[in-house]
Structure formats: C-alpha cells, structure tokens
Image (cartoon, helix red, strand yellow):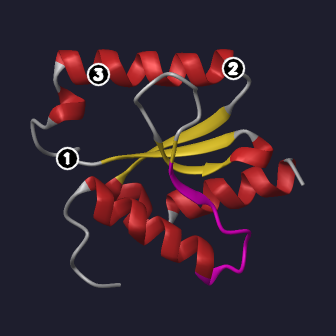
Amino acid sequence: MTNITRNKTDLADLLALQIRGMGWPLPQREWLAIPHRKFRCDIAYPNMKFFIEVQGGEQQFGRHNRAAGMEADYEKWNLLMLAGWRGLIVTGSQVKSGAALAWLEAYFAAHP
C-alpha cells in the first residue's frame, strides 16, 4: 500500500481497492442513498442496503470530530438505519490494518 492515505477520500479509495483485491462484488462510491438529502455514503452496496463510512482525521481535530460534523454524521447514519440500511463505520487506521476488510468479510459471510 502506498502512503497516500491521508484524507477520507484516499482512505475510502484504499478500502475500495482492498475490496476489489478480494474479488468481492464492487461497491458504488459516493452513493446517494436517501432521496432529497445531500449526503452520500462513502461505499455502498445498494442492492444489499449496506454502507461503509470511512472516518478520516481520527487523530486530528477535523470535521468529524467537531460537534456540528458529528451531529450531521449521526443524523445521516440514523436516517440510513431508519430506511433499512445496515452499515459499518470505520477509521482510517482500521482500513490500513485490515480490520475494516475483516468486518466486511464477516458481514458478507453472515448475509450471503
């Protein structure tokens, strides 16, 4: 893996590459899951109603660590859940370590 995984987009790209490397179904990126809402899912499997959100900036005081950003994230996740979606919320460290991929593997095994 390269050392370009500094921001959220790079981390989601890395996870998408890991998914591709496993030979699993390719996800949609930046999926608009809730009509009439601006937010998008970093990675989504619309046919399974399953999403993955990659939280960048875990060791910084970034958007997701501030009150307004956290509130918007929680609203997004709650609306997704109420619409019948399931999901994983992962950090950049979990993407880099392979933990996010292991959780996704477990999800696919439990929901074929």
Question: In the rendered structure, which disc, 2 or 3, sits on the residue that comes first in sequence?
Answer: 3
The answer to whether the residue labelled 2 contacts the one labelled 3, judged by CB atoms less than 8 Å apart, is no
Quadrant in which the C terminus is drawn: bottom right
Question: In the rendered structure, which disc, 1 or 2, sits on the residue that comes first in sequence?
Answer: 1
Question: In the rendered structure, which disc, 1 or 3, sits on the residue that comes first in sequence?
Answer: 1
State the residue position of label 3: 70
Cα distance between the residues tagged 1 and 2? 28 Å
The answer to whether the residue labelled 1 contacts the one labelled 3, judged by CB atoms less than 8 Å apart, is no
The amino acid beneath tag 1 is: Gly
The x and y percentages for residue 11 are 34, 62
Quadrant in which the N terminus is drawn: bottom left
The x and y percentages for residue 79 are 56, 17
Q: Main secondary structure of the magenta part?
A: loop
The x and y percentages for residue 13 are 40, 68
**What's the residue at 78%, 45% (across, down)?**
48
Cα distance between the residues tagged 1 and 3? 12 Å
Residue 27 drawn in magenta: yes
Give SS at disc 1: loop
Give SS at disc 3: helix
The amino acid beneath tag 2 is: Ala
94 vs 93, left or right, is right
Can you tell which mark lies on residue 57?
A: 1
Query: Start and end of the magenta stretch?
Result: 21-30
Residue found at the far left of this picture: 61
Can you tell which mark lies on residue 83?
A: 2
